[in-house]
Each structure stands twice: as C-alpha cells, then as structure tokens.
Image (cartoon, rainbow, N blue to C red):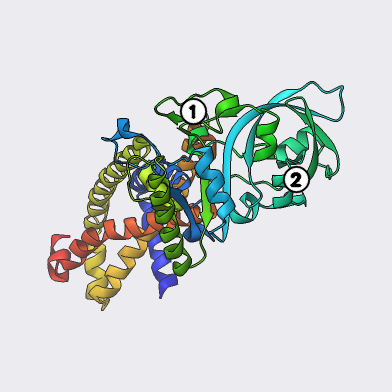
Amino acid sequence: MFAYYLELAFRSLRRSRALTALMILAVALGIGASMTTLTVLHVLSGDPLPERSGSIYMPRLDPRDLSHAEDTKLPVQVTWIDGMRLLKDRRADRQALMVGGTVPVQSDDRAMDPFIEHSRYTTADFFPMFDVPFRYGQPWSDAEDESRAHVAVIGADLNDRLFGGTNSVGRTIRANGADLRIIGVLDVWRPVPHFYDIYTGSFSGSEGVFVPLSTARALEMGREGGISCWGEGSTAENEMERASCTWLQYWVQLDSAAHLEAYRRYLDGYAHEQAALGRFQRLQHPEVTGLLAFLEEQKVVPSDVRLQVWLALGFFVVCLVNTVGLMLAKFMRRAGEVGVRRALGASRRSVFAQLLTEAGLIGVAGGVGGLILAWAGLALVRRQPDAFARLAHLDLAMLVATLLLSVIATLIAGLLPAWRACSITPALQLKSQ
C-alpha cells in the first residue's frame, strides 16, 4: 500500500512542478539556515570528554585578601603554593597541575629554522586523566616530574612538521634553548572546548609541546594565560612560586561519589588550615566544580551563536508556515480527485495517508536541499576569523538529524492541509466539479 501511495505522490508532484519546487525550496531554506547554526552550536557545546567528564573536577580555593571582599565568586585557578600542596597530598584518584605557554622549537636538524609553538607545562597525570591518545611512546612518570627531567611529549602536527610523521621517540627537540628528549608522540587530539585552560582560548587547538611543569619552571619557559594578583603580588617570572597570584590550572579525577565527598572534606580542612596560618583571610568554603558545570558557568559558547540559532529557527517556522499555505492550495485544488477516490470506496484514512506521503516526499527533497545549503553555510562559517569557525563541520549525527527534522517538520506542516482536503464530503467535492 505504501508503494502505491508513493506512486500517487510522485505523479501529483510532477503535475505541479512549480508549486512543488516552491515547497521544496521553502523547506530547504529553513532547514539549511537552522542546521548551519545548530551544527555550530552542537560543535561548540559538546562534551570534550564524553566518556569520563562525570569524574573530572576543578578544586577551587579562595586565597585572596580582604581587598576582594565583594567578589564572592571563587577563582578558577590556584597559586603555586596551593597547587603544589594539593598535588603532593595526592588525595584524588588523579590530579594535574598545569599552565600554558609558548616556546621557540627546533628539531635536531639544526638546518631547520626555529619557530614558535604553543606549549603545555603539566604533571604526569594529565595524559591518563584526560585519556590523551598516543601514537608513539608514552607520557613521563612522576619520578621525571620530581627530577625535572629534560623530556617532552609532542603533538601529531608538530611531529609531522619536524619528523615527517615517523616515530620520533628518542630524538631531541630544542625548546627555549634546551635539548629535550622526545618520549611520546600524541595521536590527533583536540578537545572541544579547550576545557582545561580557557584562558589560552576556549576553542584553541591542542598544544604542540608538553613538558613537565617542574622542568619548564627550571628552564624559564615562556608562560601565558590568565593571572590574578593581590596585595604585593608580583608577576615577575622568578617570583611566581612565591607570588600572591592565581595562575595555574588544577584538575582532579574522582571516580566515585565517596571519593568526591572525601575530597570535599579534605579541601575544606585544607582551607581551614591555611586560614589558621593567616594565608586565607576570607574563609570561603572551597568548591569542587564538575567539568560540564564549569563550562556552563564560564559560558564558553558565544552568546551570538545562541542568538543565531533562535533567529534561524524563527526563519524555519516562517518557511514552514509558507509551506503549509502552499500545501493547502495544492491539496484543495485536488478536491475533485479526492472526491472521486472517496466515491469509489477509498476511506478518509487512506486518502489522508496518501497526502501525508506526498508531504513526506517534499520533506525528503527539502532535507537534501537543506543539507546542500547547510554544507555551503558551514563553508562560509569556516572562512570567518573567529577561533571556533574552523570547527564547524557536519558530522553523521547532524546529517541524520537534518533529514529527520525536515521530514518530521514537513509531515507536521502537511497535517492541516491533508485534514482539510479529507474533511469535505465526497458529494460536495463532486458537485463542485
């Protein structure tokens, strides 16, 4: 029966080519605009660690003095003193202390000119905690953290640039004037958003060079990112370990609710201890903020992206309203045909189903057209100067969603025209002819 409905629908659409084209165009324009903006929102608001985001947290303390009494929002970074103490106490399942930077890099081929590369100075748990994939080698160990070992892990893009993509483990790179032995090469890895350090860009790419934090400090590698100081805090590089400044990111992994509760108690005890020593003058209760809650709090998705989505959806509604009007005109023009079918014994339900099948075909065609327009729209988005623009690509989930949205929306739009066409009694339809 469905095949028969399809045949009738194709015949009907071919008879009214101009009207059919207008309906398909209206649906395609609405779908194209909506899916372009929805795809951008989908990419930017995704879970950067879908398999473990529920166990990743940011401990937050307030070491500031009374000059910040009106600011009740806890910092999202830590001082060197607090970060090192929390790191060494090892009360979490995993923990990583880090900061971003840039360094001049050169391969062991001295004929190659050095260039500036984004870097990440961190501790050993960074890689297993964030499930960072390796193409070659492995991360460094806690012992290499403590000994300030001259080792490095490099990204896939940097490995391609310096070594042609071959296994470079064991070779050296020169970073900031020091020779570092490569012990690992990452596979392609770019979490979106760049959650572990939004100060270096919410949608920036993954760094090319990863160095132990202690090594980076010993070699005075260039640091960049957010910093907040108070009192007599100094931003001089040789004083950052003693400065009254928050400038390091600290993340922990807590694998169960019991571990989370225990860590909260530990953090509260640490804050009271520091208050008793006179360091924490404003004893605000520390917090342990989950990864997704942190991203929501920081509003990493630009507000204009959400506005564009609502505008595009509004445009889609206008397109659907126009489609309803065109379908109503098309179906009501076929009143005589519907009357003959009803008079020959076709039930109202079967005629209604056949008209909805016709609407569904329009939805499929409009969805395909919408995909083409969305692809073109995303190509234009990628040409924009915004940091997130190059991330705008249709994935399989959004492709399927585009087709489903088109078909479902068009079927809904076809309900009223189909019902109106079927509601007139056959006698009146035949008499009007």
- Residue 381 is situated, as x and y percent measured from the top left of the image, at 48, 33
Which type of secondary structure does the marked residue at label 2 adopt? strand
Residue on which disc 2 sits: 185
Circle 2/circle 1 CB separation < 8 Å? no
Q: Residue at x 24, y 69 (%)?
A: 340
Q: Is residue 273 left or right of residue 432?
A: right
Secondary structure of the residue carrying tag 1 is loop
Q: Amino acid at mark 2?
A: Val
Residue annotated with mark 1: 384
- Using a 10 Å C-alpha cutoff, classify the residue at mark 1 as few (fewer than 14 neighbours), some (14 to 19) or many (20 or more): few
Asked where in the image residue 29 lies, by quadrant, the reply is top left
Q: Give me the residue at 52% from left, 31% from top.
A: 225
Residue occupying image coordinates x 30% and y 39%: 311
Task: Answer with the quarter of the image where residue 266 lies.
Answer: bottom left
The location of residue 131, given as percent across then percent down, is: 62, 55
Find residue 222 and report its horizontal and vertical position in percent.
63, 26
The answer to whether residue 141 is seen in the rendering is: no
The part of the image, by quadrant, that contains residue 433 is bottom left
Q: Please name the residue shown 37% across and 52% down the image.
A: 15
What type is the residue that disc 1 sits on?
Gln
The front one of 197 and 141 is 141
